Amino acid sequence: MKTFIWTDLDEEARKDALSRPVGLSDPALTKSVRDIMDTVKSGGDKAVLDFTEKFDGVKLDFLRIRPEDLEAAWKALAEDEKNAINVARKNIKKFHQAQIPKDIEVETTKGVICRREARAIETAGLYVPGGTAPLVSTLLMLAVPAKVAGVKQRIVVTPPGKDGKINPAILAAAYRCKVTDVFACGGAQAIAALAYGTETIPRCVKIFGPGNAYVATAKSLAAQEPGGPAIDMPAGPSEAMVVANDKANPVFVASDLLSQAEHDTLAQVVCVATSQAVAEKVKAEIETQIATLPRKDIAEKAMAQSRMIIADNRGDVVDIINRYAPEHLILQINKPNTLVPAIRNAGSIFLGPWTPESVGDYASGTNHTLPTYGAARAYSGVTLESFIKYISVQKLSRKGLERLGPTVEKLAEMEGLEAHRRAVSLRLESKA
């Protein structure tokens, strides 16, 4: 974990200190993903199955999981596991139900009525990673708000294990969340199937969910195609930033950093410490905790590219946060809520010693599908509105057009668009 003292750095060094791991801009990766997507576009189900055998090491003769298998997985789940899914689902549902938008109607000029009405998207493709860690929580975070929003087709894709089966907890959660269909495929080939549709997998108008570099690149490429699907947000490896002062518990700080480091070897964590003493205590605690992690090898590789930044000035701390725009921001400082108004760029913020990042990942109710790789400068995490679009409606009375028409005619003249002007003037001249 490389250490930087913020006040000692010039502008270039500061950019370097807050740089992300390379990997998502690799031209070879982009070409490989493009080839996979083109093959799925032309080859359909067979191409998806062939890539599943090639990349996942398992030969399947099916893609769709039978509904009765979802139900059986739920029934076979241990009661404490069912309870955990139910509690998380309840909290996620409650938080997202509070986001249901209201239609608005405004009379902008007398006789000119403008409305905005919400509509759910029709089909949502929900990507649930299942490789080194079957992310049951991601299924909940995507399927629950999709259903609350009223999405008719909620399609889950998730990779099979080496035994050819999907983790039963993912199947159980899919049953509990009443998804429309589950398909056993992952990686870029699954994104391509959702983007183009196959004989079995429906084409989706929007694709959601985190994934590795192949998945992130496939989503980006699909969204760039004319008529292609929308995506929830640009995504990269998971990341977290923890701000810690001398009152922070180094055990808690280290555990939050490691909870992201164990995700992926490309995950990045940054600790902003207010002194060298705080930094040393956190580093020592990281060494202690990482030694006993089951995913130690992954966490160690992630920590090797992570950063410790020492900044003892509040203004510098805020500058670091907003420059980096972290996916997860954990504030282990005195009165953390007072810092929130100054934070412009972050996916999700966790306040104080009793708010581990893990609660947001699983069950507090907020969504854990968040912008990474600096995308928090422009993007929100997944919300209910991610599954909704808006239609504007307007209606004018004769009097309304008489009041507003001259303005429209003049603007059309200014643009040289005569047919636009006539669409108004002909009505105003009409005796009907």
Image (cartoon, rainbow, N blue to C red):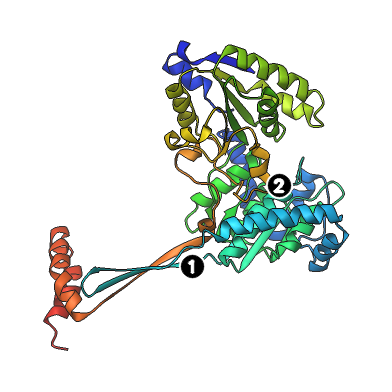
How dense is the environment of label 1, judged by Cα within 10 Å: few (below 14), some, or many (20 and up)? some
Quickly name the residue at label 1.
119
Which residue occupies the foreground of this view, 353 or 381? 353
Q: Quadrant of residue 109?
A: bottom left
Give the vertical position of 207 relative to 391 (above or below): above
Asked where in the image residue 310 lies, by quadrant, the reply is top right
How many discs appear?
Answer: 2
Q: Which of the image's four quarters has the C terminus?
A: bottom left
**Residue 60, picture quadrant:** bottom right
Q: Which residue is mark 2?
A: 129
Q: Residue at x 51, y 38 (%)?
A: 346
- Asked whether the viewer can see residue 40, the reply is no
Q: Residue 239 at x, y = what percent?
A: 61, 33
Query: Is any part of residue 289 visible from this angle?
Result: yes
Left or right: 201, with 108 as reference point: right
**126 displayed left or right of 159:** left
Of labels 1 and 2, earlier in sequence is 1
**Which residue is pictured at 81% across the width and 52% down the height?**
81
Q: What's the CA distance linking mark 1 and mark 2?
A: 28 Å
Residue 79: x, y in percent? 85, 56
